[in-house]
Image (cartoon, rainbow, N blue to C red):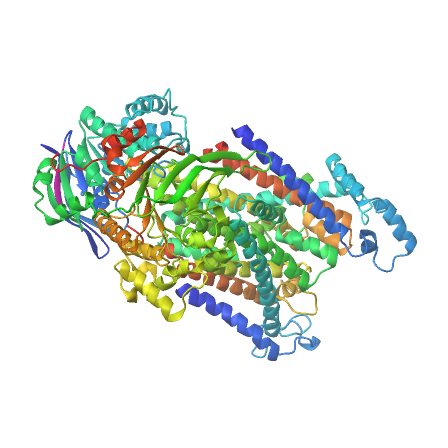
């Protein structure tokens, strides 16, 4: 007997059909993983079950929970169901909570709404709900405000709100996407435990096949508003009937071709590097200093791809900014081919050997400039920058090297997709033939299939142009597949470094072990 | 779009009237015609005449010249000084320049524009120039704060980091990358400040701290005819309508521009 | 936490006042010639000029005079008005009781109109009612308050005879009578501010309606109306507070004009007359007083922020 049964669910917004007839079931105490890349309609599915679709959307079909069709119920009845029978957890824990209300009150409010409790009783009961999501009131007083908690802790509060009244069905929309791997693993454990203990049904929505594969009982794979393949997790992975499933799986586990390494010769040398952030308070307060990078030393060899792994706040971004000469160095030294890099004083000849590709394919370009001007920007570093036809030729060459066309030079960045923009960013980094490219979360914002293509491109370019990469990421899978050596960073220090294969096979530092264990792994057979 | 055309159209009519007044007005506003004083609107004097027999339509045309010029120059002062200050503060975010600019802003904000005008007139006497100065000074922090805030959010964007990696100086980045990207905001705020400037000029002239007689100005016309309002309401109504229409037109244009230029309102991301 | 925040804000309040007093003092100092000759005009005999200089203490060094002025103000001594031949503090004290009640009255009117109107429009965004109200606020913003005042007098005082056309009966005549004589001026002052505040309130509410936590509230089972009441309003209030603070200073300054329309014996008329008579001592004191009021209101708004927003209490 299934808890929720959805039949031929269709949603359209204006003239656009977002969901084209979905059917699936969720059973009590089971987890259904709903997987799809961006634009597949997976979030719309969640919102249509909650009947919280944006204004102007039309919803048809059937979604029965305990015999009632959610799509037919009047708003008054839906209000009673939401929060009591169906709970929902959202992607962005940083903004999902009311910043002006204590966490205890936000949990208690659910109880006041549905259980007919007074505020005093509800606040008491809320303490126990918070304990259930591992925020014991002794350590995390319910009188705290959301801004006093970390992202993972806030997500626990959101979960507490959703489960406060013991709902039959829980919908979690990308609940861990905004979190670090170790936190992600804890939240997934928590959700799995709650499902087991409370006998809820859980719809776990994610773009990440690996996240879902480990805990879901059933899986449904979505694409363009349709479910292309569904079934028991192990069956789906064992058989992969639909070509898109195969494609998704292969892209997730993608391994770009290997590049042979020359004799090691240090290109970038970092010695005893310490970087400090000063935050100034008001006029009379002492500035507060935070040491973001503490006494870091390492070498990057010519032609090598070196990984730098760390969670948010580990100092990896500060380190990359320091290497790029954007961040003042407190003590220690950085040299590139034996020439010093020192904050904004770095000589432009050295900068010309160093380029960067950032994470956000939307924020990387001045939206008012054409691609030609964007790609040619690093020419600023050359004393004799090519002009006229030569400049156009160099731009064309760079664009063609990353798989774009010469005509693309005359278009604006918003005319390109996310993956194409990342190609433009790589073309910009390539154009002055640097020795080292820093890839700062360069593939993190991309869908898996696009990510696989970009990783291939990077591997290809590295061989063709003899580049070195410093690959900064929080994604262990990417590091494992594209780097020769890896460094693990925590609280401003490098806690472990070595050959990538060795580090993954036998991590020496407990933090590395924790990271590797927390990272979701995609197995062919679950 | 419709609002922008409508608002822009109204503002344009007043601007044209102001330009036209340099070459031609229906009657000469410097000549008194006591025989025809306080006439209600007729075919000859479509808006009537004032207590000296001057043609109100002609005076409103000449008054438009003053109002628009004062407001335009004042906004020019505010933008010309405020925007570079704001960009400079943002480029040195957290540094002493930033601190100094922000404190200067706070200080000027503590003096309402009317008080600045009062101080300036108390010291130098009343004149159109001092009105411009007073309104202009008040506009500086408005633009400094706006451009600093907008520039700050751009400085953390990745395309600015890329430009820094390409070795460009903060001044070059400010003008090449930041200014064009905050231009929309500045244009919209500019229209709003322009309309506020017209209101402020009218207020100052009304209490005699702005344009001095015999130069006609909308605020002055209201002040002169206030005691006659019960007798001849048209003396008060027409200059008032002129102010309201101009300000309304500019505000509509500003709103329309904002909707047209603000990319956030276009293409909602899923 | 709250106390520490209040203290840091208090220090900055004190600093602002100190800087503002220096600026005002210097402004009066740069008067062409010196204040005495500016006050007496070019026809003054050297003897009267010297006498006034001595009276004003202009023969003493600047620094000393600044400290005399500031310490005098702290004791409540604002000097002697040259034209009124009376202590400025006494003249000002009478007039404060017209200007401040007028500003407060107008502020209450403008918020009382703007809050419900802004929320109402935000919840019906895009509807005919919203569009009509927004059109009305556009008009309200464009109307100069002194012109509106003249029209109000024409309609309600001259034609309908509900109110007197000007003047102030004084608080001795009873609170009701006094408030009645401030009603038309307060409406004239409040209307444009109410229009602005309505627009700010509307856009602020719309912004919070789209916030993620509103979706959480709906998912909790709150109806749309409950979610607005319990979660949106307090959040929407934060940007509105800033505007209210700014408006108070506009209302105080706007009083200078409106008091002249209605012949109200307030600070605005005082400063206006003082300028006409070049009584710089009075100008200096009244400007300082108004700036003081603006800075204190900014301080109170900062405190109100911290009361509404726990994130501020913790910072600094």
Residue B7 vs residue A435, the one in the foreground: A435
| Number of on-image labels | 0
Q: Specify whether C66 is left or right of C170.
A: right
When the figure is inspected, residue C285 is found, relative to residue A99, above or below; the finding is: below
Residue A404 vs residue C203, the one in the foreground: A404
| Residue B51 x %, y % | 68, 70
Residue A205 vs residue B71, the one in the foreground: A205
When the figure is inspected, residue C161 is found, relative to residue A334, above or below; the finding is: below
Is residue B150 within the magenta segment? Answer: no
**Location of residue B239 by image quarter:** bottom right
| Residue A305 x %, y % | 30, 45
| Residue A500 x %, y % | 26, 37
Is residue A23 within the magenta segment? Answer: yes
Is residue B120 visible to the viewer in this orientation of the structure? yes
- Dividing the image into 4 quarters, which one contains the N terminus of chain A? top left
Assign the magenta stretch its main secondary structure. Answer: strand
When the figure is inspected, residue A79 is found, relative to residue A357, above or below; the finding is: above
- Dividing the image into 4 quarters, which one contains the C terminus of chain A? top left
Is residue A519 visible to the viewer in this orientation of the structure? no
Q: Specify whether B80 is left or right of B176.
A: right
Magenta-highlighted residues: A22-27
Q: Specify whether C300 is left or right of A321.
A: right
Q: Residue at x 52, y 44 (%)?
A: C242
């Amino acid at each position: 007997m299934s808890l929720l049964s959805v039949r031929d669910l269709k949603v359209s917004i204006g003239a656009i059909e977002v969901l084209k007839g979905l059917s699936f079931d969720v059973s009590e105490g089971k987890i259904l993983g709903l997987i799809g890349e961006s634009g597949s309609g997976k979030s719309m599915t969640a919102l249509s079950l909650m009947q919280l679709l944006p204004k102007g959307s039309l919803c048809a079909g059937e979604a029965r929970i305990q015999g009632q069709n959610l799509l037919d119920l009047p708003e008054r009845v839906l209000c009673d169901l939401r929060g009591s029978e169906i709970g929902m957890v959202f992607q962005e824990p940083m903004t999902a909570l009311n910043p002006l209300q204590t966490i205890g009150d936000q949990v208690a409010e659910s109880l006041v709404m549905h259980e007919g409790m007074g505020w005093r009783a509800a606040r008491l009961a809320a303490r126990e709900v918070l304990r259930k999501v591992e925020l014991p009131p002794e350590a995390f007083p319910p009188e705290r405000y959301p801004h006093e908690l970390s992202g993972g802790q806030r997500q626990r509060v959101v979960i507490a709100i959703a489960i406060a009244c013991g709902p039959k069905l829980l919908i979690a929309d990308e609940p861990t996407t905004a979190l670090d791997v170790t936190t992600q693993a804890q939240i997934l454990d928590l959700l799995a435990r709650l499902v087991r203990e409370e006998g809820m049904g859980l719809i776990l929505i994610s773009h990440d096949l690996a996240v879902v594969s480990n805990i879901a009982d059933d899986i449904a794979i979505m694409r363009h508003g349709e479910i292309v393949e569904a079934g028991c997790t192990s069956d789906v992975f064992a058989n992969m009937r639909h070509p898109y499933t195969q494609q998704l799986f292969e892209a997730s586990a993608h391994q770009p071709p290997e590049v042979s390494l020359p004799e090691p010769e240090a290109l970038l040398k970092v010695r005893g590097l310490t970087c400090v952030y000063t935050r100034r308070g008001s006029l009379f307060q002492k500035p507060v200093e935070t040491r973001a990078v503490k006494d870091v030393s390492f070498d990057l060899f010519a032609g090598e791809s070196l990984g730098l792994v760390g969670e948010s706040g580990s100092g990896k971004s500060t380190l990359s900014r320091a290497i790029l000469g954007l961040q003042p160095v407190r003590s220690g030294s950085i040299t590139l081919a034996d020439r010093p890099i020192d904050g904004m004083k770095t000589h432009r000849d050295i900068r010309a050997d160093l380029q960067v590709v950032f994470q956000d394919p939307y924020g990387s370009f001045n939206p008012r400039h054409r691609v030609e001007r964007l790609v040619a920007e690093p020419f600023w570093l050359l004393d004799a920058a090519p002009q006229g036809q030569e400049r156009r030729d160099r731009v064309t060459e760079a664009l063609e090297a990353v798989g774009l066309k010469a005509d693309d030079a005359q278009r604006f960045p918003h005319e390109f997709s996310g993956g194409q923009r990342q190609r433009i960013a790589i073309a910009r980094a390539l154009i002055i033939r640097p020795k080292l490219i820093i890839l700062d979360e360069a593939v993190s914002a991309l869908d898996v299939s696009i990510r696989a293509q970009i990783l291939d491109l990077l591997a290809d370019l590295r061989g063709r142009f003899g580049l070195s990469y410093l690959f900064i990421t929080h994604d262990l899978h990417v590091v494992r597949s594209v780097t020769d050596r890896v460094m693990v960073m925590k609280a401003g220090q490098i806690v472990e470094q070595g050959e990538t294969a060795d580090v993954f096979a036998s991590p020496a530092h407990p933090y590395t072990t924790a990271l590797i264990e927390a990272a979701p792994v995609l197995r062919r057979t679950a | 779009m419709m609002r922008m055309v409508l608002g822009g159209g109204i503002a344009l009519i007043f601007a044209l009237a102001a330009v036209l007044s340099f070459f031609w007005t229906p009657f000469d506003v410097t000549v008194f015609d006591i025989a025809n004083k306080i006439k209600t609107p007729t075919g000859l004097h479509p808006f009537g005449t004032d207590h000296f027999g001057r043609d109100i339509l002609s005076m409103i045309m000449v008054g438009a010249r003053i109002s628009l010029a004062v407001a335009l120059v004042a906004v020019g002062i505010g933008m010309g000084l405020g925007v570079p200050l704001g960009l400079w503060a943002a480029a040195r975010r957290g540094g002493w320049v930033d601190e100094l600019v922000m404190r200067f802003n706070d200080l000027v904000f503590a003096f309402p524009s009317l008080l600045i005008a009062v101080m300036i007139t108390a010291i130098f006497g009343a004149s159109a120039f001092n009105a411009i100065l007073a309104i202009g000074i008040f506009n500086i922090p408005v633009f400094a704060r706006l451009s600093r805030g907008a520039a700050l959010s751009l400085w953390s964007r990745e395309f600015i980091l890329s430009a820094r990696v390409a070795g460009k100086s903060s001044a070059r980045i400010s003008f090449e990358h930041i200014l064009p990207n905050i231009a929309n905001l500045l244009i919209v705020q500019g229209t709003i400040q322009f309309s506020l400037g017209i209101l402020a000029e009218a207020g100052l002239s009304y209490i005699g701290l702005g344009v001095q007689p015999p130069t006609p100005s909308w605020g002055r016309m209201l002040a002169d005819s206030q005691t006659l309002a019960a007798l001849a309401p048209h003396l008060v109504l027409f200059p008032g309508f002129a102010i309201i229409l101009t300000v309304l037109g500019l505000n509509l244009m500003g709103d329309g521009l904002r909707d047209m230029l603000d990319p956030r309102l276009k293409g909602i991301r899923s | 936490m709250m106390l520490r925040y209040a203290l840091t804000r208090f220090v900055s309040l004190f600093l602002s006042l100190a800087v503002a007093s220096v600026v005002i003092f210097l402004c009066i100092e740069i008067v062409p010639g010196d204040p005495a000759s500016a006050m007496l005009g070019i026809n003054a005999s050297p003897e009267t000029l010297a006498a006034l200089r001595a009276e004003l203490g202009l023969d003493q060094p600047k620094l000393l005079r600044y400290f005399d002025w500031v310490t005098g103000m702290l004791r409540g001594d604002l000097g002697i008005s040259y034209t009124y031949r009376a202590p400025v503090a006494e003249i000002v004290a009478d007039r404060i009781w017209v200007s401040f009640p007028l500003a407060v009255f107008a502020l209450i009117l403008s918020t009382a109109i703007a809050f419900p109107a802004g929320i109402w429009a935000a919840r019906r965004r895009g509807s005919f009612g919203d569009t009509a109200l927004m059109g009305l606020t556009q008009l309200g913003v464009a109307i100069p308050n002194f012109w509106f005042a003249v029209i109000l007098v024409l309609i309600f005082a001259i034609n309908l005879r509900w109110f007197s056309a000007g003047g102030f009966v004084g608080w001795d005549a009873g609170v009701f009578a006094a408030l009645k004589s401030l009603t038309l001026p307060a409406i004239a002052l409040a209307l444009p501010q109410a229009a602005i505040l309505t627009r700010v309130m509307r856009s602020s509410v719309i912004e919070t309606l789209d916030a993620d936590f509103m979706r959480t509230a709906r998912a909790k089972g709150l109806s749309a109306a409950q979610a607005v009441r319990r979660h949106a309003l307090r959040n929407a209030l934060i940007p509105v507070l800033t505007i209210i603070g700014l408006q108070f200073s506009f209302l105080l300054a706007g009083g200078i004009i409106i008091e002249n329309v209605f012949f109200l014996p307030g600070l605005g008329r005082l400063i206006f007359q003082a300028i006409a008579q070049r009584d710089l001592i009075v100008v200096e004191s009244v400007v300082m007083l108004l700036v003081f009021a603006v800075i204190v209101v900014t301080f109170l708004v900062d405190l109100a922020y911290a009361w509404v927003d726990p994130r501020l209490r913790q910072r600094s």
